[in-house]
Image (spheres, rainbow, N blue to C red):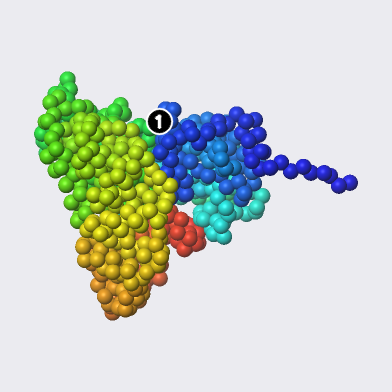
Amino acid sequence: MRKIVIETPITEFLDERLIFYQIKVYRDDEFENVSSIDSKRFGKAKSAVVKEGGNSVILKRIDIENIDIRNYVQEIKLIKEAGSNNSILEFYGVLKDRFEDDYHLVFESVDCRTLGQYLQFNELDWKQKVKIAYEIANALKFLHERNIIHKNLTTGNILYDNVNETIKLINYSIFERNSAPKKNNFVKKLRFWKRDSESCRYPKEYDIYCLGSILFQLTQNVKSTFDGDWEKYLKYYPPENVQDKYKQICKDCCRKVSNDRPNIQEVVKNLYDALQSVNNVSSSQRMQSTLSVHSIHRSNTTRNKPRFIGSIRKKNKSSLNHEGPSQPPPTFVYQSTHQETQNINAPPSKKSDAIPQPISYLTPEPDIVIPQSTSYTYTSPHNPIKPPPTYPRNLPAISSPLITQDFITEMYNEFYDKVANCKMELSNLNDAYILDYINKAGQSESKILEYIDAKQSFTINKVLLALFHQLGIGTPVNSRKAFELYKEASSKDTFAAYVAGECSLCGQGISKNMTEAYKFYEKSAQGGFAPAYKKIGLCNDMGMGVAVDKEKAFYWIEKSAVAGDNYGYYTLGRFYEIGNGCEKDESKGFSWYIKAADHGITAALHKVGTCYKYGIGTSVNTYKAIEYFKTAAMEGCHFSQVQLGQAYELGSDIEKNDREAFKWFRMASDQNYDMAVRDIQSKMQRTDLFYW
């Protein structure tokens, strides 16, 4: 007998299930400042602010046409029932578009670097490493106890707040399932583990294996390799610094037979024991150093420059670690009962770690660390001003100087000159930079906002007002109002025209419109604003907002390079190398690549290495090629990381070293680079690559 099957429309089924499982459904009019982002953390998504409460959120589209909707709804139900956890990205509900059958997952917004990014350029002491490992295991335990499997656990999917020393797991479960399947999806998801059958596609043991590889990676500390010399690594971080207990945990988690691996409860217990043993060793050392540490803290009158460090946003709040100048005004500090100068903006100290380590004063960190935005994964000439997290503001000055138009003009010229003359990327003109300028002048951001708002007849005041609204300085972020102000000022101000073009390109405060973006760029370029030159060139090269015109593209790119734009150097080199809008000249291309590399452009460093390797525009020099690949690899270029890994693996013009090869392949695989994923899959089976 043939059964009659009545199919329910997907949208109707989804609506019914969301109501049945009591999952909160948002309307699109409950959000504001919605803008598209493309981030390694979340893929293609949108950022927004909830009108009621002001929480920043991430909106991840559900591709209902390319998923098993029933299983997908079950995963949403599991995550909703699991509840919240400080170490897990919080799920708020689902957004349903009123006008289209479109659905988005609503997650909390986070603003900090991934653990993988942090480990590449920062050092952690052994206690911090074990603590991070314990927190990651605890977060995974929370998921496993609720029958949720992460499926994609890597250091690239763990956010690390170095201020509060906390982590958050992201990109779990439904994040990996809400996009159409790709041909390389199998390789991407199974980078550390080979499945046995389709029926056990993602067992919990897979998460345990991935956790083991992360525990191993925590011991590697990429920064400690200095110039990439493995012997030097062993000299400064000898294997005996790794606890035997910790080594055993790593080995147990990475056992080839999945049934031989411990469950997450055992891992958490063993890591807790390892952490306790570290605390017992260090507690006596801290007691002995208390007096000398406080003496150093009081006598140290030469302070570091302000440091701005991104942290995980909790309910739309972030922490700003700021160390002021040697003679700070009342705006920055107060005198404690212990007669110690303290930072009013510093995060509250933890009781167990209340005493600072002397090393932080002897070897200070880099002056400024720009906070990472969830909207962008890296800084490039195509990125507009990023609206960074909202930081706690400094208290108003007791008696700030009177604000005059001369002060406003001086401040505007400071910002304009640096960007217009290619001395600073527009993306670095963020709220941390501007607030630092305001604080050094002893002024109040709210008073400046009030002044420029009242005197908008001055074009530069209108541009600064737009900047304040875009970055949320003295006022909540309002991208739409910022764009309107930029647009009004664009006819008289080249900076405003350029930023209006960036907003139109990326859809900040307005829908994406490449034609409008090109018009703004053209207006800015014709006014002599150098950063707009390369934008006009790229638009003409790729036909964005205008018909393709290779010769015109070359004209503007060359003009950009002559004006001193670092990315213009690199792009002009590319044009000469392939003969794009000009006569092909590989040696000219190489010379421009060299110039861009000298100014620290990572893509140019890799390109110079490639030119030396294959003799493009210069003679073959494999030693120099490896030197440039190594520099680019340390800057995070996954192409160079693979090249360097292959050089160490094959022993070509460098001493063969499988461990070094493994390290660089692993770093590239953390960026989801498929070639590195394939290389590291084969090497993860070799236990001798674990240096202990």
- Give residue 184's position: percent from left, percent from top: 54, 59
> What residue is at 32 percent from the left and 64 percent from the top?
537
Q: Is residue 454 above or below residue 466?
A: above
User: Taking 551 as reference, is 1 left or right?
Assistant: right
Query: Which image quadrant for residue 592?
Result: bottom left
Q: Residue furthest top?
A: 337
Who's the residue at 25% across and 63% down the image?
560
Q: Is residue 203 visible?
A: yes
Front-most of residues 90 and 470 = 470
Q: Nearer the viewer, residue 316 or 244?
A: 316
Q: Position of residue 47 (x, y in %)?
A: 43, 41
Residue in view at x 33 percent, y 72 percent: 551
Residue 290 coordinates in the image, percent (x, y): 20, 30
Residue that extends furthest to the right in the rendered view of this protein: 1
**Does 518 appear above or below 607?**
above
Q: Residue at x 49, y 34 (%)?
A: 29
* Residue 607 falls left or right of residue 269: left
Residue on which the image places disc 1:
54
Label 1: which secondary element = loop
Q: Nearer the viewer, residue 621 or 241?
A: 621
Amino acid at the residue labelled 1 = Gly
How many labels sit on residues? 1
Image coordinates for residue 427, horizontal then vertical, percent: 29, 49
